[in-house]
Image (spheres, rainbow, N blue to C red):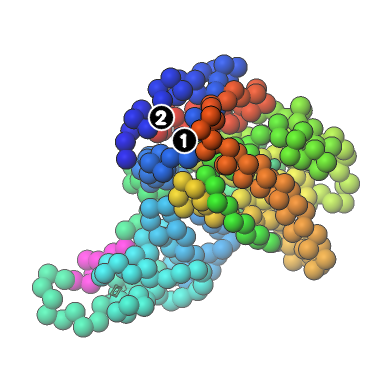
Amino acid sequence: MGTLIELLDQTELEGVTQPLQRAWTLPPGAYTDADVFSLEVERLFNREWICVGRVEQVAQPGDFLCVDLPAQPIVITRDRSGNLNALSRICLHRGMPLAEGSGNARRLTCPYHNWVYELDGRLRGAPMMEGVEDFREKDCRLPRLALEVWQGFVFVNLDPDASPLAPQLSGLDRLVGNYGFQNLVIAETLHFDSPWNWKILVENFMEAYHHIGTHRNTLEPLYPSRHSTAPDNDGEPWAFLWMPGAQAVAEDSVVFPDLTADERDGLFAASVFPTFLFAATSQNGVWYQLEPRAHDRMDLKIHVLLPPAVADALSDEERRGIRELISAIHIEDIAANEGPWRGLHGALTVQGRLSTFEKAIWQLNQYWVGRMR
Ligand code: FES
Ligand SMILES: [Fe+2]
């Protein structure tokens, strides 16, 4: 793995960091080069705040949720004191993962040789270790990650010196505050195979320019491309895309009571860099849980978020309707992900120019180059 300057062309990188009106896209190698991904693991995924779950997924003492960061399998636990913990879920003995999936347990027991861990990471017992010198169970503890809950989303950070997340999101807080994401729950989850670079999906999520092409018959009539705007983020690690609605939304379909009139008709998409994506209309929120696995693939789960009372009252037919709507839009977006992924490998493919309607991509690119360099 080299430095960014060794991996990508210096002049092309300078094009990326120009003011928006003069800016270029990331060079194709930023997406297609496995060494760039290795550098992203070191500079982004091992150092930045990564969203791994919703607080209601680990609501009760004993609840645990396993997540694979690109360079570390972890587990989020709610211990018996009610505290949330983000821990390495790799056994301190010989490297076995302690758990998979999610569930509720009093303790975590390694399935290999039955070492038992408390939910706060302390080793409680290790059988048949008598006679082993300088080994004291009480000195052993699973490595811990920094953890913060923001708007009901659980973020973790592998860097012990990372600056707290919430103060960096104060501007975004104000923009999404009326939706009350901290009060929502996951009502539905859809899984999608996503064998392409993660940044292609993030970029596509963060501009409405493609409504005129990809979503010409679906989103464009509701949220016209040309009306979309993105505020300045003052160098904070987030972007917000506002898409005003062209049609009035029926009052009785609004599930967020505190929205302004504009918010009731519109759609927002937002990102906390590098990988956290969420969006909402007045009818529901969505969280795109994106987990990069390599330069050429990621796991994608799309979660629909609703107030608990609304989620509980959904009929099967309403649930099916929500799933079909989310699916239909994402299937259109798959074409807009898979196409550029193929295209970026072309021998003649070059760095492109950005529209001013792609400001959020430009904001991501400034962050990306800043952290990667
Ligand atoms: S690897 Fe976990 S107990 Fe041996
Ligand atoms: Fe789209």
Ligand 2 positioned in quadrant: top right
Q: In this view, does 208 lie to the left or right of 10?
A: right
- Please tell me the numbered disc located at residue 30: 1
| Magenta stretch encompasses residue 349 | no
According to the picture, the residue beneath numbered tag 2 turns out to be 8
Residue 200 position (above or below residue 189)? above
Badge 2 crowding class, 10 Å Cα cut-off, few under 14, some 14 to 19, many 20 or more, is some
Tell whether 255 sits left or right of 42: right
Q: Where is residue 64 in the image (x, y as percent from the top left)?
A: 48, 67
Asked if the residue at label 2 sits under 8 Å from ligand 2, the reply is: no
Q: Identify which residue is drawn at 22% across, 66% down.
A: 139
x then y, percent, for residue 196: 54, 47
Span colored in magenta: 136-142
- Vertical arrangement, residue 220 with respect to residue 13, above or below: below
**In magenta stretch: residue 140:** yes
Pointers 2 and 1 in contact (CB under 8 A)?
yes
Quadrant in the rendering for residue 222: top right
The answer to whether residue 205 of the structure is visible from this angle is no
Q: Which of marks 2 and 1 is nearer the N terminus?
A: 2
Q: Residues within 10 Å of mark 1 (few under 14, many from 20)?
A: many
Quarter location, residue 346: top right
Q: Which quadrant is home to the N terminus?
A: top left
Q: Residue at x 42, y 52 (%)?
A: 70
